[in-house]
Image (cartoon, rainbow, N blue to C red):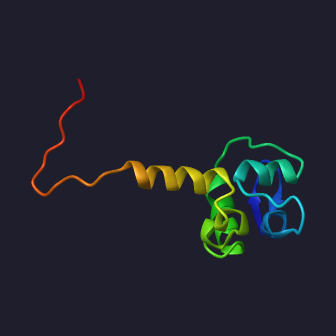
Amino acid sequence: MIICSCNCLTEAQVRESCTRAEGAARSTFEVYKCLGCSPKCGTCARTIRKIMNEALGQGCNACPVAAENACGVAKIAETLTAAIEPLPAGAALTPAE
């Protein structure tokens, strides 16, 4: 099935680009790069991400790089989780000065 009309990318090509043994794509941009093209209209980006998540076992949790906290996505998620403090019950947000 064609996923990207602008570049004529198929679902099989997208899956193969993120499951190959070497140089596997870990972002939608890397999928385009791996397949020798670049995004045009961007309509297919969400579908490509969905296919990648399915192929990798539902996103970063199944990715061996993320499991070792070696990729940028895992590091950002860890940093955000540590930085966000829950508001006490009944507390209201106030603008920063």
Q: Residue at x 59, y 57 (%)?
A: 74
Looking at the picture, how far across and down is residue 72, in whole percent?
Answer: 64, 50
Furthest residue in direction bottom, as rendered:
57
Name the residue located 67 percent from the left edge and 65 percent from the top edge. Answer: 68
Q: Position of residue 91 (x, y in %)?
A: 12, 49
Which image quadrant is residue 48 in?
bottom right
Horizontal and vertical percent for residue 6?
Answer: 78, 48
Q: In the visual, does 75 lie left or right of 95?
A: right
Please tell me in which quadrant of the rendered image residue 40 appears: top right
- Specify the farthest residue to the top: 97
Describe residue 77's horizontal placement relative to residue 3 as left or right. left
Total numbered labels: 0
Image quadrant where one finds the N terminus: bottom right
On-image quarter of the C terminus: top left
Residue at 43% over, 55% down: 81
* Foreground of the two, 12 or 29: 29
The percent coordinates of residue 22 (x first, y second) are: 90, 63
| Quarter holding residue 51 | bottom right
Q: For this view, does 87 lie left or right of residue 5?
A: left
Q: Compare residues 9 and 62 and report the one nearer the observer.
A: 62
Q: Is residue 24 left or right of residue 41?
A: right
Q: Is residue 93 above or below residue 97?
A: below
22 vs 81, nearest the viewer: 81
Nearest the eye: 93 or 36: 93
